[in-house]
Amino acid sequence: MRLGLDYYERPALQVAPELLGKVLIVQEGKSRRAGRIVEVEAYVGEHDLACHASKGRTPRAEVLFGPAGRAYVYFIYGMHYCFNVVTDPEGVASAVLVRALEPLEGIPPSLRTDGPGKLCRAMGIDLSFNRADLRGDRIHLLDMPPLPSRSVAKGRRIGVDYAGKWARKPYRFWVRESRYVSRSPAVSQA
DNA sequence: TTATCGATGGTA
DNA sequence: ACCATCGATAAA
């Protein structure tokens, strides 16, 4: 069962930990690639200085202000793409960055999925997916049973040290026992 | 194990 | 000039 609008149209901080365990599907022609989400980060709105929407309604960030359940894909450091799930009602610019997947199907064994840039390459996600409806055939998420709260860990977001106090918020969530989480400073639990 | 650095190009 | 990254390299 695909996740629907009512699932995405909620606060990013609520959606983010619940996305752990859900399955991302990318279907391109004959190839079908699937991975289980094991690490995410919430970016909670224009007031969040780590969120791309904090610079206003720029062309890049525009999709964040739109309806929930769309993909926000951006190009970074001249060579990587990052994939986000847009959340909250229209007008509230927030999203969840997917940072790591456990490979399930169709992913070339030589490619890794333990990092936001790596998983996009492994899944074949590029700018052509930006603004895509996440309920469509080309890309979507499958609902899965919720994880027990003891297997959800949380800590500070990676790579946003410029964001002052927002850099220290525990908005990163990962599956504690997963070996596919990107290697990085772990912090707390629950 | 941690620390540092270069690649590479869109964004503002 | 900066960057929601990555892989290589060096030091310890």
Image (spheres, coloured by chain):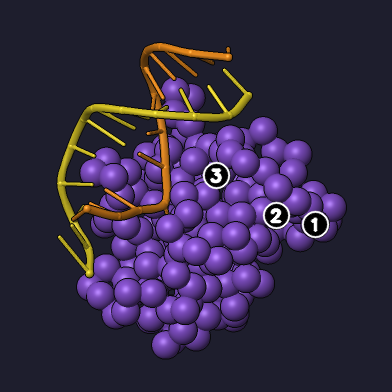
Chain colours: A purple, B yellow, C orange
- Residue A4's disc is none
User: Circle 3 — which element?
Assistant: strand
- Which sits in the foreground, A63 or A158? A158
User: Circle 1 — which element?
Assistant: loop
Q: Position of residue A116 (x, y in %)?
A: 46, 46
- Residue A100's disc is 3
- Which chain letter goes with mark 2? A
- Which chain letter goes with mark 3? A
Q: Is residue A136 left or right of residue A16?
A: left
Do labels 2 and 1 touch, CB within 8 Å? Answer: yes
Quadrant containing the N terminus of chain A is bottom right
- Cα distance, mark 3 to mark 2? 14 Å
User: Circle 2 — which element?
Assistant: strand
Q: According to the image, label 2 marks what residue?
A: A154
**Which kind of residue does numbered mark 1 sit on?**
Ala
Q: Going from the N terminus, do you reach mark 2 or mark 1 first?
A: 2
- Which sits in the foreground, A152 or A4? A152
- Could you classify mark 3 by the number of other residues whose Cα lies within 10 Å: few (under 14), some (14-19), or many (20 or more)? many
- Which sits in the foreground, A64 or A9? A64
- Cα distance, mark 1 to mark 3? 19 Å
Do labels 1 and 3 touch, CB within 8 Å? Answer: no
